[in-house]
Amino acid sequence: RGAIAAAKALINEAIAEKLDIKNFSSSNTFRVTDLGCSIGPNTFLAVQNIIDAVELKYQSQGHNAPEFQVLDKSSPAWNKGRIHYSNASPKVFESYAAQYAKDIECFLNARAQEVVCGGLMAIIVPCRPNGLPCSQDTIIDTLGSCLLDMAKKGIFSEEKVDIFNLPLYFASPQELEAAVERNGCFRLEKMEILPQEKPSGNFSRGKVLSSQVRAGMEGLFKNHFGEEIIDEFFDSVHKKLNELSKFESGNGGSLFILLKRIATI
C-alpha cells in the first residue's frame, strides 16, 4: 500500500503528460488492467488512482469521461467457480495454449544453449492424450469441487475460491511435437506416455493421486487458503477420487520425451 501511495503522483504525472486521449473516443470503453500480485483493497486502490487520473485528463481537455472496465487478474468474474481452464470458455483455453507455446519455445531455446550438438535431453512432463477435450480434467475438477464444498460449509468464502487459479497447462503429445519442430534446435528421438503408477499395498488409486497432487501443489493451496485446512482438503480429494471411476482409465499422465540437439543454420 505504501508503494502504491508513493507512486500515485508519478502515475498522475504520466497520465497527464503522456496519455494521448486523441487516440481514444469517450464513447468507447476505457480498459484498465491490473497485472500485479495484490488482491483486495490494495488492487482497488491502485486501479482507482488510475481511473481518477484518466477522468481528470478527459475533463481537462473538455471531454466526457469514458466508461471504465477493470480487468483484474484476481477478479471473481474472471474465472468464477473454477480454479483452472478446465470447463472454461474456448478463449480462456486458447490464451493458456498460446502462453504455453511461448514458454516452451523459451525453454527449448535456453536448453539449446546448454546442450552440445549431438547431445541428448530427456524430459518428463504432465500431458493430456491427443484428442482429449480441454474440458475434461478429472483431477483438477475434483480439486475445485472439494474447495467449493468447503466454501459451502463456511470454512472459507466462495470468493476465496474464485480468486484462486492454478496456472497450469497440460499439452498433448501433438502440441509438444509441433513445438519441437517449430523450435528447430532439437530432433525428436522418442515420445511415449508413461504408464500410470499402480497402487501398492492398501493404498487406493485415489490416495496415490491425491498424494501426488499434494506433493507438488500443497504450497499453492496452503499460501492461499491457510495451513489449517490442508489435511481436511486433501482427505476430501482422496475420498472424492475414490468415488470416481473414469479417472482409472486416465485422462492425463506423464510424457517421456527424448530430444537430440541438432546443428542449426
Image: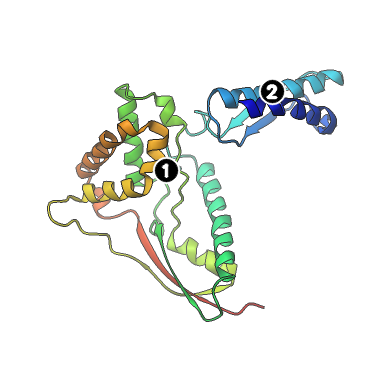
Q: How far from the left and from the top, in percent, is residue 115?
A: 54, 74
Instruction: Please state which of residues 231 and 103 is positioned toward the viewer in this rendering.
Output: 231
Q: How far from the left and from the top, in percent, is residue 181?
A: 55, 69
Q: Residue 106 falls in which quadrant of the image? A: bottom right
**Label located before the other in sequence (1 or 2):** 2
* Element at label 1: loop
Residue at 30%, 29% (x, y): give it.
Answer: 149
- Tell me, for residue 49, which label it has, or none: 2
In the picture as drawn, the residue positioned furthest to the left comes out as: 202
User: Which residue lies under the disc numbered 1?
Assistant: 86
Residue at 20%, 41% (x, y): give it.
Answer: 243
Colour approach in the figure? rainbow
Q: Is residue 142 above or below residue 132?
A: above
* Element at label 2: helix
Q: Nearer the viewer, mark 1 or mark 2?
A: 2
Q: Amino acid at mark 2?
A: Asn
Q: How far from the left and from the top, in percent, is residue 90?
A: 50, 44
Residue at 30%, 51% (x, y): give it.
Answer: 212
